[in-house]
Every structure is written in C-alpha cells, then in structure tokens.
Image: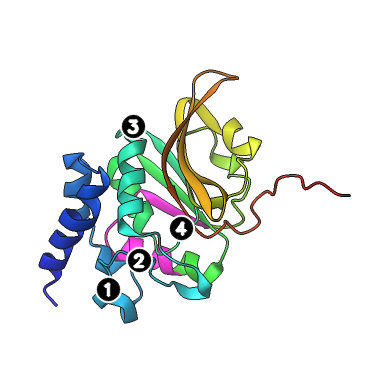
Amino acid sequence: MNIEQARFNMIEQQIRPWDVLDQDVLNLLTIVKRENFVPAVYRNIAFADLEIPLPGGERMLSPRVEARVLQELALTKHETVLEIGAGSGYMAALLAARARSVTTVEIAPELAAFAEQNLAANGVSNAHVVTGDGSLGWPGGAPYDVICVSGGLPIMPQEFLEQLKIGGRIAAFVGDAPVMKAQIITRVDEKQFRVSDIFETVVAPLKNAVQPPRFKF
C-alpha cells in the first residue's frame, strides 16, 4: 500500500468534502501519522472512512469526524485541553499539536497503556495519559480552555460545564442513537453557555455516562 497516496486520498475524498477547509488542520493530518496510532493488524485500513476497532471493544472515531471536531474547536497554542477517552492516543496527538498541553483520561487500563505508548513513540511530549473515569470530567486540572469528549453523552453533565474557563469550548456528541449531535458549547460567562450544533452522527456512548432521568409509571 502506498501510505502517502492513501493519506492524500483520505484528506481529499473524506475530510475536505466534510467542510474541513482549515489548511492548518489539513496540514496536521499529514504530519501526525494516523497509521502509527492504529493497532498493527489494522494498519492497512488506517485511512478508511470507518471506526477502527481498538482493544477492549472500543473504536477510533472516523477520520472525518476527528478532523471536523479539531477544526471547530479552533485551538490556540496557549490553551490547556482535557480529552475524555484517550483511545489510541491519535486525537490527543492532534490536539497536542495545536495546544499547550493535553490531559487525556482513559477508563480502560489497556487502552491507556496503548495510548501512552503511541504518544511516546511519536514524540508527543505535551499530552499526558491518566487512567480513570472521566464521565464527570477531571476536576484535578480544571479549569480547562477546551474539553473534548470522544464518546457519546446522553446529556451534558453540569460538571463538564463547571470545569470550563470563560471563553472555553467543549466538543461533545450529545443525545442517543439513532440521532446524536456533535456540538461545540462555549462558555460565555459564569452562567451562560452558547451551543452550536455542528453535524449529526452516532458514536458509542462514553462508559458510565450520566443518563437523563427516566419517567417511572
């Protein structure tokens, strides 16, 4: 397989048509090598438009979803980022390339180890993997400029909102299948938040995600 041709095709055929037009983001997708973050057995489909399986039954987000979220967050070099769900470490590497530092929280120890190994092997020194339950955020490092939630949330927990700086943004997939919304939530001031719906998708729910109250009869 011609790796560079496959990468070029991914960018031109999947990502750019999905309204990812920020040249810095597109350039980053050539610099951060996605094939180095997928399990070795799936390396030949690293650039396919699908969710690649990871250890423990988890999956990577598809390339176009990752790229679009990265674009919409519009990170700057001074910002601190919290990622919930490290997965393979690939999204953390992309975030780290645009931010000052990334803390990525992974509940599954084998995935945390996989992400840590991938980040180290690819020279990413400003992303730190923590093993733990990030379903209510990670208050130890709060407040954050950016929170990126890489799994589905039936509802947005108040704890995430409280861990955000004023002017900060959360990227999250909110709702239940069959229709979930990728949202960017911006903290306007102490009490106000602005919600922008970016696209509709379906992603696997975050482990231990907060559930909305259910009616009981």
Residue depicted at 22% across the width and 53% down the height = 29
The one nearer the camera, 209 or 144, is 209
In the picture of the structure, the residue carrying the numbered disc 4 is 86
* Circle 2: residue type: Leu
Disc 3 vs disc 4: which is toward the camera? 4
Disc sitting over residue 20 in the figure? none
Disc sitting over residue 78 in the figure? 3
Quick check: is 125 in the magenta stretch?
yes
Local crowd at mark 3 within 10 Å, few (<14), some, or many (≥20)? few
Measured from the top left, where is residue 36 in percent x and y? 27, 68
In the picture of the structure, the residue carrying the numbered disc 1 is 45
Answer whether labels 3 and 4 touch (C-beta < 8 Å). Answer: no
The residues bearing labels 4 and 2 have C-alpha atoms spaced at a distance of 18 Å
Quick check: is 189 in the magenta stretch?
no
Answer whether labels 1 and 4 touch (C-beta < 8 Å). Answer: no
* Circle 3: residue type: His
Answer whether labels 2 and 3 touch (C-beta < 8 Å). Answer: no
Measured from the top left, where is residue 86 in percent x and y? 46, 58
Q: Is residue 32 left or right of residue 196?
A: left
Residue depicted at 32% across the width and 77% down the height = 42
In this rendering, the answer to whether 170 lies above or below 97 is above
